[in-house]
Amino acid sequence: MPSDAAILIVDDHEDTLYALESALAPLGYRLLRATSGDEALKHVLRGQIGLLLLDVRMPGVSGLDVVRYLRRLEQTQHIPVILLTGFGTDQELTSTAFDLGVADLVMKPVDPWSLRTKVRYLYDAHQRALALEREVRALRTHDHSQEQEQSQGRRQDHKQEQEQSQGPRATAPAATPAPRTAPAPQSPRPPRPRTDTAIPVQRDGENRTPAPKPAPDRT
């Protein structure tokens, strides 16, 4: 089933536009036309362009100028471009075209069957690349969301484990300062006994207790 992206045909001659539209109509793609480079840029910048069929020589903005502008923008730099020329190809034109990333360079008048084959291949390949890019972006977004959810779940589990291991925390009452008591009065110490009491000395002439006499030897 053809994509919603259109094929833009750009040429400054109405008869050429009609011939190209007739050649591409059997493909079933949506076709748009432009008669100048400026008009072609307006169509591309609106979006939904899947391929450009572009005349090289046009008054004002040429086909090569259009390609140069498209390659500077991220959203248009990968759109496939087929250049058409009715004045023959030369080495400079060919080198410049392929340096700008042009997919093909076709001589006028075109062969309808050959043109349809090239257009179908380039258009479908570009749409497949865009679809793959969208899928990769969606997968990355999904994986990132899963990683965030898993990380959050791990943090919650870790927090619950810590709370269970620590148990309920009892809040201790605030310590109140002990009242300050006055120091107890000291009792007076008893007087120490005097150790310098004079020992009575017996003087001469005073009564003395006589010493006991020794027992007589009866042997």
Image (cartoon, grey):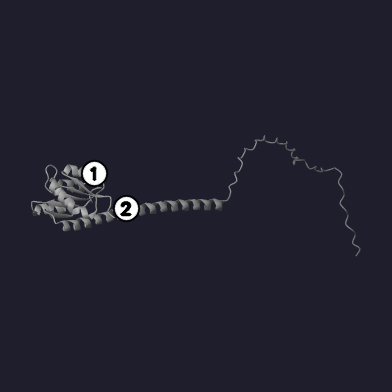
Tag on residue 136?
Answer: none
Residue drawn where x is 52% and y is 51% of the image: 160
Badge 1 element: helix
Between 149 and 73, the residue placed more toward the observer is 73
Q: State the residue in front, 144 or 106.
A: 106
Q: Which residue is at the front of the view, 13 or 51?
A: 13
| Image coordinates for residue 2, horizontal then vertical, percent | 27, 54
Q: Secondary structure at mark 2?
A: helix
Left or right placement of residue 34 versus residue 176 in this view: left
Query: What x and y, as percent, mark residue 46?
Result: 25, 43
Kindly identify the residue that appears in the image at 32 percent across and 52 percent down.
Answer: 134
Residue 162, horizontal then vertical, whole percent? 52, 52
Rendering quarter of residue 112: bottom left
Determine the CA span between mark 1 and mark 2: 20 Å
**Amino acid under disc 1:** Leu
Residue at image position (21%, 53%) is 25
Determine if residue 100 is in view: no
User: The N terminus lies in which quarter of the figure?
Assistant: bottom left
The x, y position of residue 140, in whole percent, is 36, 53
- Residue nearest the observer in this picture, 164 or 29: 29
Per the image, the residue denoted by label 1 is: 45
Looking at this rendering, what residue extends furthest in the bottom direction? 219
Dot label at residue 134: 2
Q: Quadrant of the C terminus?
A: bottom right
Drawn side of residue 195 relative to residue 17, left or right: right
Q: How many marks?
A: 2
Mark 2 nearby-residue class (10 Å; few <14, some 14–19, many ≥20): few
Q: Amino acid at mark 2?
A: Arg
Residue 97 located left or right of residue 215: left
Q: Could one spot residue 84 in this view of the protein?
A: yes
Which residue is at a point 25% across and 56% down the rendered structure image?
A: 124
